[in-house]
Image (cartoon, coloured by chain):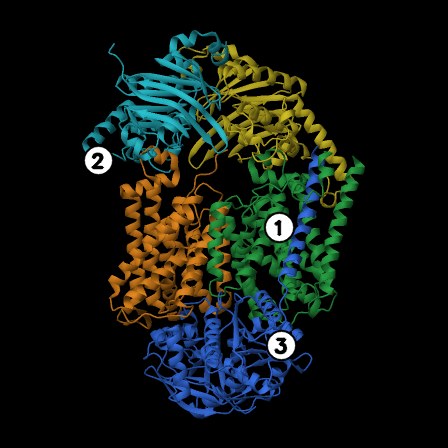
Amino acid sequence: MQEFFQQLLNGLSLGSIYALIAVGYTMVYGIIQLINFAHGDVLMVGAYVGLGMALAGFGLVPSILVAMLVCAVLGVVLERVAYRPLRNASRLAALTSAIGASLFLEYGMMAVFSPRTRSYPVLLPDKIYNFYGIRIATKDFLILGTTLVLVVFLQYIVYRTKTGKAMRAVSFDKDAARLMGINVDSTIAVTFALGSALAAAAGVLIGIYFNAVYPLMGLMPGLKAFVAAVLGGIGNIPGAMVGGILLGMTEALVSGYGGSMFRDAVAFAILILILLVKPTGLLGTRVEEKV
Amino acid sequence: MPLLEVSKLSKSFGGLVALYNFNLAVEQGELIGLIGPNGAGKTTVFNLLTGLYPPSSGKMVFAGKDLRGKKPHQITRMGIARTFQNIRLFGNLTVLDNVKIAYQSGHNYGLIPAFFRLPPFQKKEKEIEEASLELLEIFRLRERAGERAANLPYGEQRRLEIARALATKPRLLLLDEPAAGMNPQETKELQSLIRWIRDHFQLTVILIEHDMSLVMGVCERVVVLDYGSIIAEGTPEEIKEDPRVIEAYLGEEGVAS
Amino acid sequence: MTPKQPLLVLEDLHVYYGAIWAIKGINLTVNEGEIVSLIGANGAGKSTTLRAISGIVRGSSGRILFQGEDITRIPAHEIVKLGIAQVPEGRRVFANLTVFENLELGAFIRKDKKEVKKDLDYVFTRFPRLWERKNQVAGTLSGGEQQMLAIGRALMTRPRLLLLDEPSMGLAPLLVKEIFAIIREINGDGTTILLVEQNARMALQIADRAYVLETGRIVLEGQAQELAECDEVKKAYLGG
Amino acid sequence: MKEKNWFQTLIIFIVLFAVYGVVQLGISENLISDYYQTNIFLAGINIILAATLNLINGFTGHLSLGHAGFMAVGAYTSVVVTMKLGYPFPLAVLAGMVFAAVVGFIIGLPTLRLRGDYLAIATLGFGEIIRVILVNVEYLGGATGILGIPRLVNWTWLFWGTVLTLVLIRNFVRSSHGRACLAIRENEIAAEMMGVNSTYYKVLAFVLGAAGAGFAGSLYAHYFYVIQPSKFSFLLSFDILVMVMVGGLGSLTGSCVGALLLTVLSALLQNFPEFRMVLYAVMLIISAIYRPQGLFGDKEISAQLLSRWGGIFRATSRSE
Amino acid sequence: MAKLVSSRKLRYYALATAVFFLLGVLLSGCGAPQKQSEAEKIKIGINYELSGKVATYGTSCKNGVVLALEEINKAGGVLGKQIEVIVRDNKSDTAESVNVATQLASMGVVAMIGPATTGDVMAAEPVATSNRIPLLTTSATAPTVTFDEEKNKVREYIFRICIIDPDQAMVMADFVWNNLKLKKGAIMMDTGNDYSKGLAEKFKEYFEAKGGKIVATEGFVDTDTVFKPQLTKIWAKKPEFIYIPAYYNQVGLIVKQARELGIDVPFLGADGWDSPELVSIAGAKALNNTYFTNHYSSQDPSPEVQAFVKAYKEKYGVEPDSFAALGYDAGRLMAEAIKQAGAADPQKIRDALEKIKDFPGITGKLSFDEKHNPIKEVAIIKMVDGKQELVTKLVPKR
């Protein structure tokens, strides 16, 4: 039983990492319906920026903030260069561009910083708490807490602020939004900035959590986070969180009970099952196509 | 026996009742108008008849066969065809291909002849092509055969949609606001076209339309829906006078034309 | 009647959609306080004209003047701030937002909270049905209600010029009448209106002046009543 | 008119045989270096992959990201047949195609109800599941894969395999079955209303595409000595997708050009080892931005255009 | 009409296909490789994983090789000639590996170094063999790389510089049994990696032959970052040690996470552990009470090793890992073979390689056995507060 709870907890911390990335993913998807494959790579850049800051002797908070700032700019540049010209083009062209952007960041970083793994200096006290034999580290709290705070923060932005309203309007109908006086380009840019800043925060936290920063570090978490976003209902912020945690727990339980080699397969199988039963994801709602 | 018999047909989406206890019997060769305010459930009737939505309850019998549980393409092959309120052509395909696609339902050659262009392929393709061109001729679209459907002017797109529906060789044709977006001149032409195809192809037609001039000019019987239920039924003249219809739909001045 | 000032002037406007020449040199004037109708067949370029005025599409040559200022190159979201609102074809309300949020978005550009509140009250008195449904998601409204919401939303920008694109489209006869009555009232309250309509009969009834558009060119213009009696118009657009 | 067609077919065959013969001669006389041969073979396999994916993505309009998975199925099946069971290569190719088609059917039937990005992610998931299964089957070499596969594919196989694939796909697309697929791409509901059984045709296109990928997989396995599960990850599916996109969705000639272009590009970039992938990425973005519909859109290069280039067919095309 | 259109299309396809293939032929004609006879320089081809999945390892190897060959060039080259280093990226892809190998062969290289992983080497092997060019791999450990078990024949042109799996596994099993005196262990391995799986298998075999017991075997995949589920499960079986034959980037995380879970038993590993990054990932404290087998230690005080570490750091800005060290030795070994061959001739170089005796590499003294595997001493290294300490050196008893 104790082992089971430890496994659940393991899953929770893995899941909150997925959730943290998925939240940014889902937000960008929500507004321009583009699978931003470079999201995981923005995360990687964020992790590198944070690493640079940390190596220069800055603490956790300034490192995260600077990484977020740099990636917000990166996100806007990415949108401007690789996505905006394709806003009215076919999905596949946009997807190609996104793949290109993703490869560019990965291999650009590899060319500059070599593919080797780097690690963070100690930024956090590595304290471990023991509850009746179940062990939790400080950083588990950190990740889970950050995810929760960010989800609440984003929900607030999207549903309570003017910018959020503009984002929702743009996501639904760009021309109609324009007619309301909404600057569509800057709204999308803001969304990218926000999503990329989140990715950067996730990148730094993941860098600290795993103590490993390398150019391809965003690839798999990015894909998993996308799966989590779809699982929760893409475009839906709490959904991304639920999807991420669910995915993390599933993976932990699968790995913990003998199927570690089949873990990814099980994760994808669950995704497919949920899509088949409820194509809009767990919390997603989408208006049915009108005939 | 009526060609189409619908009884106690109901449909609800979640808690919202879109159609309630809808009854309709259509005899072979009739031309029926279905009118009513927006959201009254007219298009829902079509969507139920063509299998796009499953009904919540009720019966639909077409030519003695139950329509419930049938897929749209099966219903098409049973002899019901339709057009759409917002035109749904195969925009990037040629006008000719649009019609050919409709023609091939029901009779077709296998995959192997298709892959290797065997005689059955040659023969059937020739048949399909000839029949399609003939149909386009009727609808004055033959010159346009090679053009992308999306490039046609609006009125011709509407005509092509009807032509395409006819290519499935229906017994019952459902037209959903065919005059929407047409000017009075075009609407008039449409009116005579509908009459003509009904006679020429020996069709039964159900028509949804807001344009009263068209409904009154072409339909023999009119059914009025409001909030998912039938509120009146009768000849165009009877409908024009019906106080409930005037209140719900036409307004105090009655029919304009 | 006071001498009318031209509020909006189109000078030799040309618009291309890719390779398609949609508007071929239009000259058009809307005076302060008027209702002007633009009628014509499908694909004549009516909607394109409105979209060009709002800045959603760009004219390739020619000028658009609003209150004497050249707005041809101003981006769409800035044009709204100058006082031009549009009710687009097919309503285009934000279906996933509530009625109230839709109206709030209409006031997106405004900072004067008190005045916004006043305008909200104005819209709700004008459209009591929207008040009843203010917390409902716009997608669940009926077609007529959506049209009202779209107009209300546009009014929330407090426009000097309101562009209406096919307000009667897809509506039952009774509703069409209601909408047109409202348009007249809005005009009575001081908003200038440029109306694009398929339903030429209604459009000419309500308008002061009108233009007839055919394949991207203006072929007729004049007082609405005169046009309504003109034979060509009667034959092509009024059903005989 | 009949004779005209025969005449044209004859010319086509002469041209094809000429090309086949010239290259064959070049290979046997060692005029074409191994390096160019390798790239020609890679190009051929890529053309098959791109063309068959185009059948699903371009002609039927369903975004699939699982092509690498089907290629893996074909590759492994054929290698098992030749290496473990000892049957001849043609049988192995057939088995690879059939098994890939079966897997395509099993995957396609449930997932093709999904649309757009949902379908994309579901097929990507299935592709990855196939890969994970391969990693875990010891019989198939696990993660190491199967090493030392004999090279059984020669120029004859490659050339006629590619030509046949293209001709069959093109025949399919220009038949009533293919039109049904196009109709589904354009508007699924309207296609149903025209009596097109959309489920059947969607699954059919998917299965045919999968079989094609299986074919490419078996050629690949028997040319490049080694197959490993890691080769067939979603990144390979992306590569194929990019070829289709660069060429143009719904254009077979586009797929050929796209596959060829990217193969050549990849080969040329070999000479810039440090920046190979960075340059590749930049070119992807540029091509997407400047040619979002792909080089050919959904058009095929017209014969007139070609005859203007080559003059070979001037006589016949004028007579039309 | 439609029929005419379609036959026109058919013609087009045929022609297009033809044109493309012809294009390829033309290209090949233009770019015919010059023959090597008049070449002033000795060409060595480097075929490595510089992008893709295992770029980390490939890049390190390549860096080592390039450093070694540049040093040799600076010192005057071999046989009075400079060495031209041709570096190519195989994208961690077997087909690309074939492609690169053929390109290198047609450019007239006299020897190839790389790739790093078994699959990529096996893809390049037929190219090397059929072109009769020796291929030296730094890190492909599977037995089949140099020895064809089916034909029971050594692969004539393939050599490797790394210790093979059985040697390392055997030394570690001996060490655990005899020195640490532990009887009950668990294994964690990368199931997507032949190196890891090979070592795990062999270790289990030798350890159980001695009478030990493996109570749990858990796998992970290379993209994993969270290992707690597997560790939690292993820990429930109460092993006395855990053997993790994997690469440092994963090992670092595993050890770190294990210590977080309160797993305090020794961890054991192999040469994949050797990297300065290991300490920074896992933390010095967590790594106490861990041992691994290796050919050398970057903290080895010997002047050769320290000179290498310094030069490498100067050139690339990072500390070398074991891949880089193997690459460095591979480069130097190849130059030595050319020197001993007396001519830049692939066949002679191959023969010279076979005869190499006690080559003084920084990763240990090296000779090849009859299967082209190196005979090297294996070092057992203990981690103490983030520093490597040499425990003992053992010769594998094959």
Three-letter code, disc 2? Lys
**Snapshot quadrant of residue C103:** top left
Q: From the viewer's perspective, tell me whether residue E94 is left or right of residue D2.
A: left
Q: Do the CB atoms of the residues marked 1 and 3 lie less than 8 Å apart? A: no
Q: Do the CB atoms of the residues marked 2 and 3 lie less than 8 Å apart? A: no
> Can residue A142 be spotted in the picture?
yes
Which quadrant does the N terminus of chain B fall into? top right
* Rendered location of residue C132, percent (x, y): 30, 29
Disc 3 crowd rating (10 Å Cα; few below 14, some 14-19, many 20+) is: many
Q: Residue furthest left?
A: C114
Q: Which chain is green?
A: D
Disc 2 crowd rating (10 Å Cα; few below 14, some 14-19, many 20+) is: few
> Where is mark 3, residue-wise?
E133
**Which numbered circle lies on residue D256?**
1
Determine whether A61 is above or below D303 in the image.
below
Which residue is at a point 60% across and 49% down the rendered structure image?
A: D255
Q: Residue furthest right?
A: D3
> Where is mark 2, residue-wise?
C111
**Snapshot quadrant of residue E350:** bottom right
Q: Label 2 is found on which chain of the structure?
A: C
Q: Which chain is blue?
A: E
Q: CA distance from mark 1 to mark 2?
A: 57 Å
Q: Which colour represents chain A?
A: orange
